[in-house]
Amino acid sequence: MSSSIMPTYKRLPVAFERGEGAWLYDNEGNAYLDALTGIAVTGLGHCHPKVTQAIAKQAELLVHCSNLYQIPTQEALAKKLCDLAAMEAAFFCNSGAEANEAAIKLARLYGHQKEIQTPKIIVLENAFHGRTMASLTATGNVSIQQGFGPLLDGFIRVPANDIEAISAHTSDAEIVAVLLEPIQGEGGVRRLNDDYLSTVHAICHNNHWLLMFDEVQSGNGRTGTYFAYQSLPFIPDVVTTAKGLGNGVPIGACLAQGKAARVLGAGNHGSTYGGNPLACAAALAVIETLESQDLMTRVPVIRNRILKSAETHCQSWHSVQAITGKGLMIGLVMPDVCAELVSIALEHKLLINVTAGNVIRLLPALTLTDDEADMIGARLAKAIDQYSTQRAQV
Ligand SMILES: *Cc1c(COP(=O)(O)O)cnc(C)c1O
């Protein structure tokens, strides 16, 4: 079939028409169990009634008016996010990449305000920060950078979980910030060590570098706290969020506290859509639902049920080399490249993802019932068994 869409995605041969909670329904009426939530976006499940209601209500009142005017819904969302995350100020945009662009610009301006003419930001190997030019440069994946040079100057890449590699740069007076994902998502659901993160925080503090966490994937309750850093004994200077923030309505934010909250001023940055009334109403409903239903306490319970059920039902569980991530960022490390597992799972009416070649990635909803969690585990087990059998035959 010829398509009028640029072929930038390898799409699976299924089209969804309707979603409800953990379930997606295709245009032939088949039901699929969603363990991916549109890549960590619909954390409350599809079409959560509270969010749907908030969107519908706001759509009748006002969808957009631009940031030339006061936006009370945006004020309310900023206050809510800052209270929740121990931050002081928010900048709103429409995606994760844009949230990181804002953080990168903030860090550079922070440098220029300190008379550093060519500020540099430390980033990690295997990082993923988005596909716009600066976020692509910050991303540690040569294959997606290929063909888009020249990339930006001003980034230094170091291996993750390696303190020496960062402290080796403390004499470089041009460094202004460290940008990292506390749990690397696209890079293979790799969790950075708590000790490593605490030491990086201390190095940043001692050298007046900004510590910037990209929580676009790990945020919004996914790891059991609103942001992953809230299980650590410190807070970063800057945090970026997007994916789960609007449960599917595009919105991103760059939050900052302390000196970082006072860097960007009038005219320094902007977005036409960013933080419009519709997106903010959706995000407010998401946060209120997360809090009022105590959903974050369910996160470790659901993780354990999915993994327990998968292990119980799987004959070839020994082929899983390691289980990684935290909360509902779940990685199952397989021995080899296993992209075909996505199609096999689809045959079993289960939506999953494989990242970094050999890591099965699950990013399920925080609203799963115990039964749905068990069912995801059971279907995953069948898919892994089928994959293992097929592999043994070749
Ligand atoms: C998905 C992702 C991004 C990019 O978000 P977009 O909304 O696709 O621009 C950035 N950082 C992390 C950690 C992500 O997972």
Image: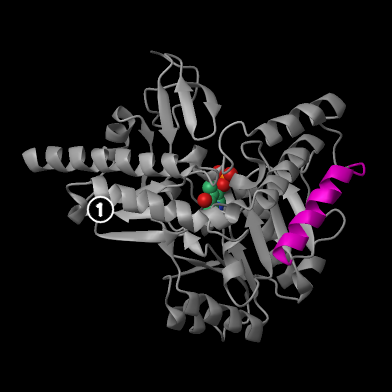
* Residue ranking furthest to the right: 69
Residue 250 as seen in the image, left or right of residue 336: right
Q: Residue at x 65, y 77 (%)?
A: 209
Which region is colored magenta?
Answer: 68-86
The quadrant of the picture occupied by the N terminus is top left
Dominant secondary structure of the residues highlighted in magenta in the image: helix
Instruction: Report crowding for label 1: few under 14, some 14 to 19, many 20 or more residues within 10 A (C-alpha).
Output: some
The quadrant of the picture occupied by the C terminus is top left
The amino acid type, in three-letter code, at marker 1 is Met
Q: Nearer the viewer, residue 367 or 257?
A: 367
- Position of 32 relative to 185 (above/below): above
Give residue 97's position: percent from left, percent from top: 60, 48
Q: Residue at x 27, y 51 (%)?
A: 311
Name which quarter of the figure residue 58 lies in.
top right
- Position of 209 relative to 355 (above/below): below
Q: Nearer the viewer, residue 159 or 368?
A: 368
Residue 44 as seen in the image, left or right of residue 59: left
Q: Residue at x 24, y 43 (%)?
A: 384
Residue 312 as seen in the image, left or right of residue 118: left
The number of discs equals 1
Q: Is residue 384 visible?
A: yes
Color scheme of the displayed model: one colour
- Position of 385 relative to 123 (above/below): above
Mark 1 lies on a secondary structure that is: loop
Q: Nearer the viewer, residue 393 or 28?
A: 28
Residue 174 falls within the magenta-colored stretch = no
Give residue 270's position: percent from left, percent from top: 78, 48
Q: Is residue 141 visible?
A: no
Q: Nearer the viewer, residue 215 or 332?
A: 332
**Residue picked out by circle 1:** 334
